[in-house]
Amino acid sequence: MPSENGTNRVVIAVACTLLMLNLGTVYAWSFFQKPLCETYGWTNSQVVWTFSLAICFLGLSAAAGGLLLPRVGPRPLALAGALLFGSGYLIAALALRMHSLPLLYVGYGVTGGIGLGLGYVTPVATVSRWFPDRKGLATGTVVMGFGFGALLMSKVIAPFLLAQVSGDMVLAFTVMGVLFLALSLASAAFIRNPSASWLPPHVTARTVPDTDALWVSAGSCIVSRPFALMWLIFFCNITAGIALIGFQSPLFQDVCAKLDPALGKEALSAYGGTLIAASSVFNGIGRFFWGALSDRMGRRRTFSLILGSQIAAFALLMQTSHPWLFATLVCYILLCYGGGFGTMPSFVLDMFGARFMPAVYGAILTAWSAAGIAGPQFVAMMKDRYPGQPGLASFYSFAAAICFLSTGLLLSFLVKERKVTFRED
């Protein structure tokens, strides 16, 4: 297997994927949404701000991390992200013990979110350097780990811990903090860059000049028309999907309860956890599947297909009251949601070149920040406004998602992509 100075690039990819797996547990937030509302008497909007802030600061810190990465290198940045991410859980545990919503925001939302951003941008930018010949496949595989994090949390870590501590949320968050500190720091310690001139042995040269030559600075990339279009497309896809991620468990429980009012709280919670687990698998697979597909059909066409097919899925969600059809549609939407994250790193690399990739990709992740607030907050507002009418709240939420996706689809046709290919022996 291709290596440099004794370093196997597959080992680097595995370490990056494991770090992403830990960070991706943030996507299981809806597992805690309803219990926190019921235990502490907080509203949906109040609780989901924790998740929104985590995603917001993820994007903002990823932008800063993209600028810092060429200066400090991937390992220090990944270690800093791992430390802050685990610490966020520990501060959140203290916040729950004190019944302090502001401290929960500072801990899980701000501190954990900054750790998420620094940790997220580093593996993606690093693995793209080790796999210049298979950018979509490699970055898709790494970010697939982020998608699978929700499965790890919702079906393994959280249920096991809550059962062991008799539902004590404070103790559960404490143990999770220690666990994620250990696992994330261990994974981050393996991450490093190849030399600037390195290429895999079977690749002899680029057959098309590197797009670095088209841009004079990272700033010129970020203020360009292609960047603006890509940012908006990414924002539209994320907003629709993350609104569903933040509330998929409560929404699914509403559908199940309407079909069978006799279902108890524990049964409904189990159904919600199962959907989180199933959809997280599709979220993870989507990052690999669409990323690899984009290597063949192009990044812009891939995004057009991702956005367009979701419009039909959300339209069906507005009409269905059958739990398993609802769950199937959610899984498909999460497949496409993950696909956006699997495709965008390679899209950025093709459009702006390897030299500016860390800074530009970090900046484009601010779309995640904005979407992390817009999507979940809109759904929370609808659920709080129509507490006795979950069907109406869902209808308005899904209609808004269709509007975002339609806008993104139209914008995708305006992008003129570039592609860098390689000659192999």
Image: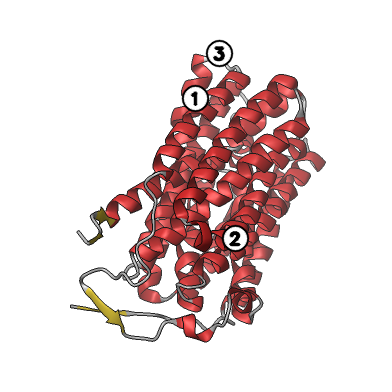
Looking at the picture, tell me which residue is in the foreground, 264 or 369.
Answer: 369
Amino acid at circle 3 = Ser
Coordinates of residue 44 in the picture (x, y in percent):
74, 36
Which residue is at 61% across, 40% downward?
A: 112
Q: Residue 27 carries which label?
A: none
Whether residue 282 is visible? no
The C terminus lies in which quarter of the figure?
Answer: bottom left
Q: What element carries label 1?
A: helix
**Secondary structure under badge 2?**
loop
Residue type at numbered disc 2? Leu
- Residues under numbered marks 2 and 3 in contact, where contact means CB atoms less than 8 Å apart: no
Percent of width and height locating residue 108? 65, 36
Instruction: Find disc 1 in the rendering and name its residue.
Output: 159
Residue 422, placed above or below residue 364: below
Q: Name the residue under label 2.
A: 365
Label located before the other in sequence (2 or 1): 1
Cβ atoms under marks 1 and 3 closer than 8 Å: no
Mark linked to residue 166: 3
Q: Residues within 10 Å of mark 3 (few under 14, many from 20)?
A: few
